[in-house]
């Protein structure tokens, strides 16, 4: 096996950033499948015998150059989470009303909550527990939410009496100007 071919395969896996089949790699490397298979074996062996943060792995979708699982905690802290606008708004609603029943959140935000909540739980921003007094789930933000968004304390929503008092105060201040 030619080390230059293995190095070229390594570059292809790195640049594509996703799993590739042997056929795809062969096409990019302009060589036959047998040469690619030998190159992949050489790469896997090379990564297995060095102290590296990377590894070449076979997945159901093909071969991939990826970060070793030992470094997943580092990924969680260094790479910003990509949240869609809907999920971000759902997270904000949970944070401002924490704890909130999922059924109440659905009334507030709509049925998209069914997709947002599992994503937010998986990312570790929301804790979901069965509520003892209803058939719904109780949702609340986690310490990871506070740490990630660098929020120590959230503003507490006003109850109706506080809203009326604030409105009266605002009107009184505005009238005095």
Image: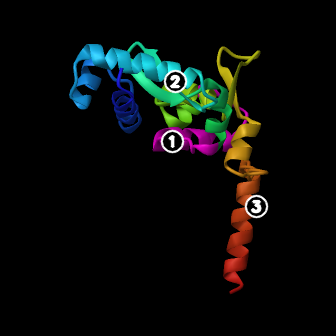
Question: What is the quadrant of residue 125 in the picture?
Answer: top right
Q: Are marks 1 and 3 in contact (CB under 8 Å)?
A: no
Residue at the bottom extreme of this rendering: 177
Mark 3 element type = helix
Q: Secondary structure at mark 2?
A: helix
Report which residue position mark 1 lands on: 82
- Which range of residues does the magenta coloring cover? 78-103
* Lateral position of residue 24 relative to residue 145, left or right: left
Up/down of 34 relative to 172, above or below:
above
Rendered location of residue 40, percent (x, y): 40, 19
Q: Write down the quadrant of residue 63 in the picture.
A: top left
Q: Residues within 10 Å of mark 3 (few under 14, many from 20)?
A: few
Q: Which residue occupies 35% across, 25% down? A: 2
| Residue at left offset 62%, top offset 27% | 121
Locate the C terminus and report the quarter of the image it occupies.
Answer: bottom right
Residue placed under numbered mark 2 in the picture? 46
Can residue 84 be found in the magenta stretch?
A: yes
Residues packed near mark 2 inside 10 Å, few (<14), some (14 to 19) or many (20 plus):
some
Q: In the visual, does 140 lie left or right of 119?
A: right
Most foreground residue, 170 or 119: 119
Q: Is residue 58 magenta?
A: no
Which mark sits nearer the N-terminus, 1 or 2?
Answer: 2
Foreground mark, 1 or 2? 2
Which disc is residue 165 wearing?
Answer: 3
C-beta proximity under 8 Å, tags 3 and 2 = no
Can you tell which quarter of the image residue 106 is in? Answer: top right
């Amino acid at each position: 096996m030619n080390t230059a071919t293995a190095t070229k395969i390594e570059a292809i896996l790195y640049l594509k950033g996703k799993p590739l089949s042997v056929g795809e790699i062969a096409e990019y490397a302009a060589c036959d499948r047998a040469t690619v298979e030998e190159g992949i074996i050489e790469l896997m062996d090379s990564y297995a015998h060095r102290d590296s943060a990377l590894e070449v792995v076979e997945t159901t979708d093909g071969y991939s150059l990826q970060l070793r699982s030992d470094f997943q905690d580092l990924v969680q802290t260094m790479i910003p989470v990509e949240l869609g606008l809907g999920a971000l708004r759902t997270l904000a609603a949970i944070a401002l009303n924490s704890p909130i029943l999922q059924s109440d959140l659905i009334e507030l935000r709509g049925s998209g909550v069914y997709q947002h909540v599992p994503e937010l739980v998986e990312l570790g921003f929301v804790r979901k527990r069965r509520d003892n007094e209803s058939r719904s789930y109780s949702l609340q933000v986690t310490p990871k939410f506070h740490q990630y968004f660098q929020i120590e304390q959230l503003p507490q929503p006003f109850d109706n009496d506080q809203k009326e008092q604030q409105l009266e105060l605002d009107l009184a201040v505005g009238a005095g100007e």
